[in-house]
Amino acid sequence: MNMQFTCLDLLPQSWSTVLRDSKMIISILRLLNFILEELIQSQIAFYQNKHYHLFDPHVGENCCQIRAAQLLVYATQPLKSYVAKQYQIEYLHKRKMQLNNAIQHFSEHRETNHSLTLIEFLKKHELIFLVSIPDKYIFICYFLTKFKQSKFSNHDTIHYDRIANEAGLSIKLAKKMTRYYQISLAENSCDQIIDWADELGFTFQYIDMLKKMVRRDDDERNVLPCYFLTDVIIAKLKMERMPILIALEDTHHTRTPKLLYFYFNEAANAFRFTDEIAESVMKNPCFVIRAETEQPLTDHLAIHKIAKRIEENSLSKIILNYMAAHPQYSGKNLAAWKENPFQFLSISPAYHQLFLKRIITAKQAGIKTGCYIGNRSFFFIRHIFIDSYQHQLNEIYAAPTSHSFRENLTCWEALEYVL
């Protein structure tokens, strides 16, 4: 996908917004200046510094695995060379200088009764710049991660006050901007899954089913059922030989997480565990799964034992079984489809039965083997994101030796004011 967007696609305002006076012009230019700075910082953090942990956005639906996979592809298969990326950052810095000059000009030469629309104004003053799909995606992930704040029981929200202060916006516009980015990211994520399914050779019937399963949640975000979208992601990870890193904790969080690195073994056509990781590989991005288990994680032998059990049960199947046992959609509007994504879906009866049987079988396996909220004995996934082995290791070393029990005590989860 080499499609280009412009800076107008990063603004929450409509292109046809009429800029009535200098005050409105300066307000728009300052917002664009703020966005451009965040865009530059997102490029530096992702491509130059490789700080992948800064790209774990709060979007509000339950599809974090799409972001992890898509960012992993952008990190390992960049569309631009290192020199081209450097040039892009220089290009954006020049656009920023132009913007600052325009802000200064309209601050010193205040006029009234402007009648140009936003797009006409930016064209006239040569302030429109191009943004590729990956750059837009990376920017939005960076923005939503930067202004994310963690609340009780690991529940993330957006720090609207901070956005408003840094961007010079009202709280209302900060919320509008965030929602606009979340909707855009969710739409792109669903489109990417369908594109990958086509690219990977999934059947026409499967792709048709995915297209019909795209639904809108409570906040107008596009969502897909997590089992079927993860099926496509696993196939993509295998085709691209992407590593999966599991940060595994005991369910009571009494010890620091243990890192289990799985590479894709072509001969076995499966993910295989190894604890012999080259130093060069440790800094490479991984598909990271934060999970918990009731299995002992006391020593080296115990770690190898659970790694062997994961291999024997197939890591791919374990992930899919968990996703099948997980609610397929989130929010009140899609409650009718949470357990059965095929409700009111118009596909041929034969394929309906085939796909339904797949998800039911996987769900039963997930519940039985302990990959389920009611039975976390084997492998319960908390979160999926992109990061490197090295940074995850650094996080573990930096963590306090005593672990908090708060997030595992049900009564404390119910009483949100308890710290």
Image (cartoon, grey):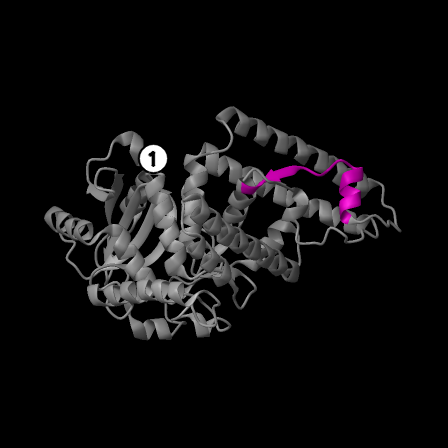
The residue where tag 1 is placed is 283
Q: Is residue 100 above or below residue 365?
A: above
Circle 1: is it few (<14), some (14-19), or many (20+) Cα within 10 Å?
A: some
Q: Is residue 245 left or right of residue 65?
A: left
Residue 15 % position (x, y): 73, 50
Report the span colored magenta.
118-133
The C terminus, quarter of image: bottom left
Q: Is residue 17 left or right of residue 320?
A: right
Residue 276 % position (x, y): 19, 35
Residue shown at 32% from the left, 38% from the top: 241
Q: Amino acid at mark 1?
A: Lys
Q: Is residue 260 left or right of residue 229?
A: left
Residue shown at 34% from the left, 61% from the top: 323
Residue shown at 31% from the left, 62% from the top: 358
Q: Residue furthest left?
A: 301
In the picture, residue 242 is in which quadrant?
A: top left
Q: Does the segment drawn in magenta span residue 85?
A: no
